[in-house]
Image: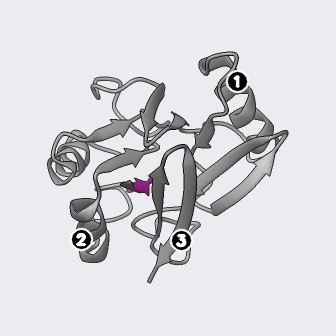
């Protein structure tokens, strides 16, 4: 069984000064961390990577420096569950369909992947065209979010359980 901390849209330093303590605790307790982009700086990326202890899957968001050492889409298998991570950059109109299209393009043809994306700062846990779509919101309550949020997933033998965490 693996515990996965799922965060996004930290926006440090443009909209927040640091990762909230309770998010730090959740990341440190996790076996793996997924960050769906918009760290906003190399400093924020390094902080999350350090907290994750090398067990980090991350992607670049639209506010991240081009030099950030992460791809725009990443795939990781944890506990028998395949996660495809992307930021979801673009208009909020069509966001769900854009995420599902990205996941289908990145995943193996016979895979049943879980999509993880950010960008909207809204928590999402839904199924779109047969694809589980997760968005942890903003870990630092970056506008337009009104509270700090993240997701914690438990994966085991191909099963997935997701819990929303917030302040």
Q: CA distance from mark 2 to mark 1?
A: 33 Å
Image position of 85 with respect to 74: above or below: below
Between 55 and 62, which is closer to the camera in this rendering?
A: 55
Looking at the rendered structure, the secondary structure element under dot 1 is helix
Query: Residue at position x 73%, y 41% from top?
Result: 91
Q: Nearer the viewer, residue 94 or 57?
A: 57
Spot occupied by residue 70 in the image (x, y as percentages of width and height): 34, 27
Residue at x-position 18% and y-position 39%: 54
Relative to 95, is 73 on the left or the right? left
Dot 2 or dot 1: first in sequence order is 2
In the image, is residue 9 part of the stretch drawn in magenta? yes
Q: CA distance from mark 3 to mark 1?
A: 25 Å
Mark 2 vs 1: CB contact within 8 A: no
**Which residue does the image show at 38% across and 62% down from the upper left?**
15
Q: Position of residue 39 (x, y in %)?
A: 35, 46
Boundaries of the magenta span: 4-10
Residue at (81% x, 45% y) in the render:
128
List x then y, in percent, for residue 133.
67, 47
Label 1 belongs to which residue? 104
Q: Which residue is mark 3?
A: 164
User: In the rendered image, which quarter contains the C terminus?
Assistant: bottom left
**Chain-order first, disc 3 or disc 1:** 1
Residue 121 lies in the magenta-colored region: no
**Residue designated by label 2:** 25
Classify mark 3: residues with Cα within 10 Å, few (<14), some (14-19) or many (20+). some
């Amino acid at each position: 069984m693996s515990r996965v901390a799922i965060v996004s849209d930290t926006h440090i330093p443009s909209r927040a000064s640091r990762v909230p303590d309770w998010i730090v605790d959740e990341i440190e307790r996790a076996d793996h961390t997924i960050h769906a982009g918009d760290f906003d700086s190399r400093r924020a990326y390094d902080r999350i990577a350090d907290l994750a202890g090398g067990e980090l899957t991350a992607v670049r968001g639209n506010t991240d420096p081009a030099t950030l050492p992460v791809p725009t889409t990443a795939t990781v298998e944890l506990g028998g569950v395949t996660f495809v991570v992307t930021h979801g950059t673009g208009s909020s109109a069509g966001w769900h369909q854009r995420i599902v299209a990205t996941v289908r393009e990145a995943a193996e043809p016979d895979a049943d992947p879980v999509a993880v994306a950010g960008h909207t700062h809204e928590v999402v846990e839904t199924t779109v065209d047969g694809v589980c779509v997760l968005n942890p919101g903003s870990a630092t309550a970056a506008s337009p979010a009104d509270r700090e949020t993240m997701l914690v997933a438990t994966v085991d033998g191909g099963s997935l359980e997701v819990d929303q965490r917030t302040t």
